[in-house]
Image: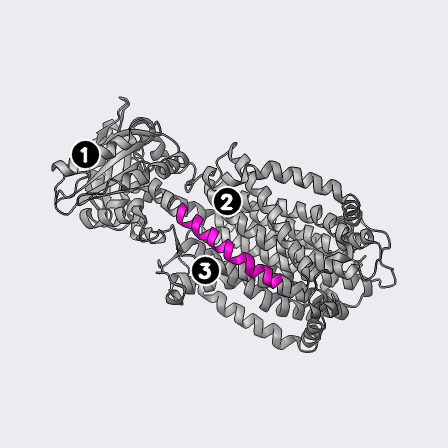
Amino acid sequence: MADTTSTASHPSSPPKSTPGVLGRWGAAMAGRSRLVFGVWLLLLIGLGAAAPSVFSSLAGAGWQANGSESVQVRELAGQHFGGNSSAAVQVVIHSDRDTINSPTMQEAIAKATAVFQGDSRFGEVVPPQPGMSISPDQHTGILIAGANANTDDMVRAVDDIKGELTALSDGGVEVYPTGASALWSDFNKANHDAMIKAELFSWPVTLAIMVLAFGSLVAAGLPLLLTIAGLVASAGGLVLLNQITPISVWAMNFAMMFALALGIDYALFIVSRFRDALENHTNRAHAVAETMDTAGKAVVLSGLTVLVSLSAVLLVPAPAVRTMAIGIMLAVTFVLAATLTLLPATLGALGPKVNAAALPYAKRQQHRSPLFERWGKTLHNHPWPFALGSLIVLIALAIPVIGLKVAMPSISVVPEDAPVRAGYELVQQQMGEGAPGMLQIVAPSAEAQQVALTAAQTPGVEMVTPPQPALDGTSYVMLQALPSVDPSDAQLGTIVDDLRGALPANALVGGAPAENLDLQQALNDYFPMIVGIILVLGFVLLLVALQAPLIALIGTVVSLLSTAAAFGVAKLIFQDGHLSGLLGFTPQGFLDGWGPVFFFAMIFAIAMDYTVFLLATAKEHYERTGDPDAAQVDGMAHSGRIIFAAAAVMVAVFFTFALSDPLPPKEMGIILGVAVLLDAVLIRLMLLPALLRLTGRAAWWSPSWLRRVLPAISFAH
């Protein structure tokens, strides 16, 4: 008969009196604080020297599905057609008064051509061509500067010359750089400015919350110092890593956000526990050892959960998506390293001084919160109303996710005053809705006429340019197809599919809109796999940490529920447009395509972060008493205030990004902020404790065979 006892169902077993591995490690850090400070100082000086250049040196593109048909077209265009690919720079030259052949317009074309000369990053410069890149009324022309470098270098090239190009606007002539490279240049700048503004705004808000949570200026400052160390190290690390492989500038944007949020989370948990341990130990090293043996384990497991969740995103064959995950993982790694080394060393050096500059109420503050103890007892006495009530709200918010639509961002995500948007809208006015998103077709020369005829007959294609032979004499031709719809219109996907289905097998369809569609398809294809991997690995980590299959399963499922609810809210706001007036944006009618994959990993990681904090604390008290009721109440009493404060910090940090003008950081801030708010209030402080009460001893049960397989992990000190 199977053994049905719990791993921690023996209250007669006294808690261990000697520190475990993490406890001994923490004591060692506390005892060698000067050495630890010296190592971190050298590390921060070394990496900090590279950190200031992080935004200028990181890659600006990478939004593509490697190996896709559209990427093949771009590579062929770069090799055989003078760089006239999706990465080429298109310069729109327009005059209401003069035509393209007037001296004024020709002078502007000549000056624009001169801007590209002498820069090896640009290939052949093609002036406006009749029937191809000149508007029917002759008042607008598009000059094309071929891409002679990779997509990242082309974005940097536009960064360097766009000011010189727009300065040519004079005497009634307007000059605007457009195209994918110019779009990413303006887009990245707008997002960078928004991220910096949000970060600067979030720091004082965060400090205020920290002071209220800790009641001590010294204790409140420690999480921020820890975060700064993690940020500087990760920024320098990304610059160095960029020397090996291109890293998206978005990686630093996300790293900044996560380093601040998780750094404060971890420090809150550690510092709060250390202040409690000081009540039981006169020796500060012993207090650090107890802290690391309990809260330290929860932080390590939380960090591993975050890293595991984000590692699944690396499966997506898109450089920008992969390197965003790498950026966050690097930031989390440095923050985790600082939490396990620099923080215990600092606590060991400070000792009781961690409570210095305390506010009056803080002197009466205990780790065991009377307020959250009463809340825990309320949940214990009335579990069903709170469990059912929170479930109903979460399920109601999750239902809209069924109708969620995703697509790559439209031109509307770029600020209205950006040159690329002005050029884009001008091209549409003069040449048609689909003109900014011309499709490129590369085919063998022998099939040129058949390809041209078939493409012209495809529904949704308004015009096809004559086949252009390869400049290097190879047997390829390129044709341009003008779609009848805007590049962000959902019908474009049907047009591209029909075109690919009708053309001969050797003909390839690409162009910037096709690259977006191929990337979106890759994200859609990999999404179920990523969700499955994250759920399985999250469950396994919780199982290893808690040694109890039922509560590990419950923790995983409720984290999934909060994630679904956050996406349901995202659908209501960003797709349907609810609150768009209040938040100051125009809805696109869909969520940005990279959102589900990336936000799922991020939200699930944050949700599991709080799950580990709550359940690790409850497990600690269950190991001490063997009483599931005491574990539920004491777990809430000892972790509730920390979870509440940490969630308040995260919500404040994330919601500051809602103030951004560009839509992507606004989406990111609101979705993550709503996710944390729902997760902390409805799940960690309501549903999960109620489920602990309802499942009782079964929550902590573990079969004997599983206990033999799993490593022995204890949270009691």
- Report the residue marked by disc 3: 658
- Is 163 or 441 nearer to us in this picture? 163
- Label 3 sits on a secondary structure element that is helix
Q: 548 above or below 686? A: above
Residue 572 lies left or right of residue 213; in this view the side is: left
- Judged from this view, the residue extending furthest toward the top is 473
Q: Amino acid at mark 2?
A: Ala
The mark nearer the N terminus, 1 or 2, is: 2
Residue 46 lies left or right of residue 525; in this view the side is: right
Which residue appears at 58% of the width and 59% of the height? Answer: 206
Q: So how many labels did they put on this image?
A: 3
Q: Quadrant of the N terminus?
A: bottom right
How far across and down, in percent of the image, does residue 196 sit? 48, 51
How far across and down, in percent of the image, does residue 475 sit? 27, 24
Q: 568 above or below 326? A: below
Q: Amino acid at mark 3?
A: Ala
| For discs 1 and 3, the disc positioned in front in the rendered view | 3
Q: 17 above or below 690? A: above
Circle 1 packing at 10 Å, graded few (<14), some (14-19), many (20+), is some
Pointers 3 and 2 in contact (C-beta within 8 Å): no
What segment carries the magenta color?
188-210
- Is 135 or 240 nearer to us in this picture? 240
Q: Which mark is residue 466?
A: 1
How far across and down, in percent of the image, does residue 392 sit? 54, 72
How far across and down, in percent of the image, does residue 262 sit? 60, 53
- Label 1 sits on a secondary structure element that is loop
Pointers 1 and 3 in contact (C-beta within 8 Å): no
Q: Which mark is residue 251?
A: 2
Q: Amino acid at mark 1?
A: Pro
